């Protein structure tokens, strides 16, 4: 590969292109639920889900959106004076509600000093056109990224993990959102029950065909208090929990097949030790990133290296 060729498109570089200052996401828990929790499309939520795994201490529903943001700002400002922030509506389905209530929550976040945009995490079956058109107008004067939980491109897997939607819903939502001029993020979990490494790689061309701007991926983690943890106890043979080197190899091959302009936000997730059953790698995100980069340099690999070959 050319020495100047980037290994992959990093999210930090994406933000640098958009903002003339350092930007940090602040996670929010805005009191939403999900349609597969309240009976609209199902009960109990996704089998892997325990929102405690990604909510920081300041992120609690008894606190207002404004207070969560102010506490998040205080946490980050110590390290990076002059930082600006993106309000990250992360927990559960953050487009699931009445339009006026949604607008009130988003606009409360944008009213906080130094908040320069929104990242809205949601499901592909919870994006009505009226909300999309509102977000489209909002994006004319502030940054708005809509991030969809895709998790898998396999309808069999989506049923098994109780997502309550199929991949056709993903395609529809991503295409409608991109058509409004909004950047679109996707999130996938690599190694869901019943899926092999080969199955995981087969999803890459399907994702590359979507008008995605960003993509998050992470390894399957078994979390205490989830139905998937119970399933693992009963049928461990249905699960393949990647070891570090094996997962590094999978991520590299995933990147080689991925459309080269998609921004890659992360490869791994770190859940709290008291909640994590397995796998426990003991690696920070940046440490894993270094392993991926080292392997790619050794191989002469880069994002999109096999994209045209596979697309044909």
Image: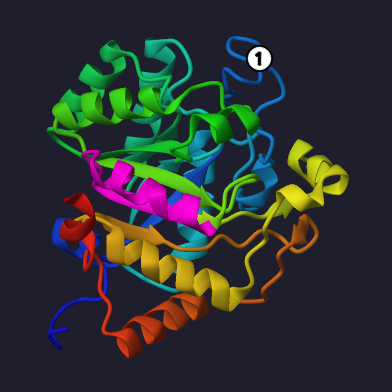
The quadrant where residue 82 appears: bottom left
Q: Is residue 114 visible?
A: no
Residue 175 x %, y %: 23, 28
Q: Is residue 213 magenta?
A: yes
Residue 307 x %, y %: 21, 59
Q: Nearer the viewer, residue 12 or 198?
A: 198
Q: Is residue 290 magenta?
A: no
* Residue drawn at point x = 56 percent, y = 21 percent: 164
* Residue drawn at point x = 71 percent, y = 60 percent: 272
Query: Magenta region: which residues?
Result: 197-217
* Residue drawn at point x = 72 percent, y = 24 percent: 44
Q: Secondary structure at mark 1?
A: loop
- Judging by the rendered image, the residue that carries numbered circle 1 is 38
Residue 243 vs 184, above or below: the answer is below
Residue 220 x %, y %: 61, 54
Residue 58 vs 132, above or below: the answer is below
The quadrant where residue 280 appears: bottom right
Furthest residue toward right: 234
Residue 306 x %, y %: 23, 64
Q: Is residue 62 visible?
A: yes
Residue 10 vs 225, above or below: the answer is below
The quadrant where residue 35 appears: top right
Q: How many residues crowd mark 1 within 10 Å: few (<14), some (14–19), many (20+)?
A: few
């Amino acid at each position: 590969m050319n020495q100047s060729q980037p290994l992959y498109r990093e999210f930090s570089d994406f933000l640098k292109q958009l903002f003339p200052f350092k930007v940090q996401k602040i996670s929010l828990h805005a009191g939403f639920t999900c349609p597969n929790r309240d009976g609209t499309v199902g009960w109990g939520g996704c089998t892997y889900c325990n929102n405690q795994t990604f909510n920081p201490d300041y992120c609690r529903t008894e606190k207002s959106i404004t207070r969560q943001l102010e506490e998040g700002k205080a946490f980050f400002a110590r390290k990076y004076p002059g930082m600006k922030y993106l309000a990250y509506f992360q927990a559960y389905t953050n487009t699931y509600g009445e339009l006026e209530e949604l607008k009130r929550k988003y606009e409360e976040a944008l009213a906080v000093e130094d908040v320069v945009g929104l990242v809205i995490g949601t499901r592909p079956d919870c994006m009505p056109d009226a909300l999309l058109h509102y977000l489209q107008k909002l994006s004319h004067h502030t940054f708005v990224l809509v991030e969809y939980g895709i998790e898998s491109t396999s309808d069999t897997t989506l049923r098994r993990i109780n997502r309550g939607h199929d991949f056709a819903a993903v395609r529809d939502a991503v295409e409608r959102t991109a058509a409004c001029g909004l950047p679109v993020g996707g999130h996938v979990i690599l190694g869901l029950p019943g899926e092999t490494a080969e199955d995981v790689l087969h999803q890459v061309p399907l994702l590359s065909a979507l008008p995605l701007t960003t993509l998050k991926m992470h390894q399957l983690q078994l979390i205490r208090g989830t139905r998937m943890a119970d399933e693992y106890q009963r049928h461990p043979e249905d699960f393949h929990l990647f070891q570090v080197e094996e997962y590094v190899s999978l991520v590299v091959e995933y990147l080689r097949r991925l459309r080269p302009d998609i921004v890659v936000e992360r490869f791994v997730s770190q859940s709290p030790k008291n909640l994590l059953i397995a796998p426990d790698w003991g690696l920070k995100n940046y440490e894993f990133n270094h392993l991926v980069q080292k392997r790619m340099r050794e191989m002469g690999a880069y994002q999109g290296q096999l994209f045209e070959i596979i697309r044909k």
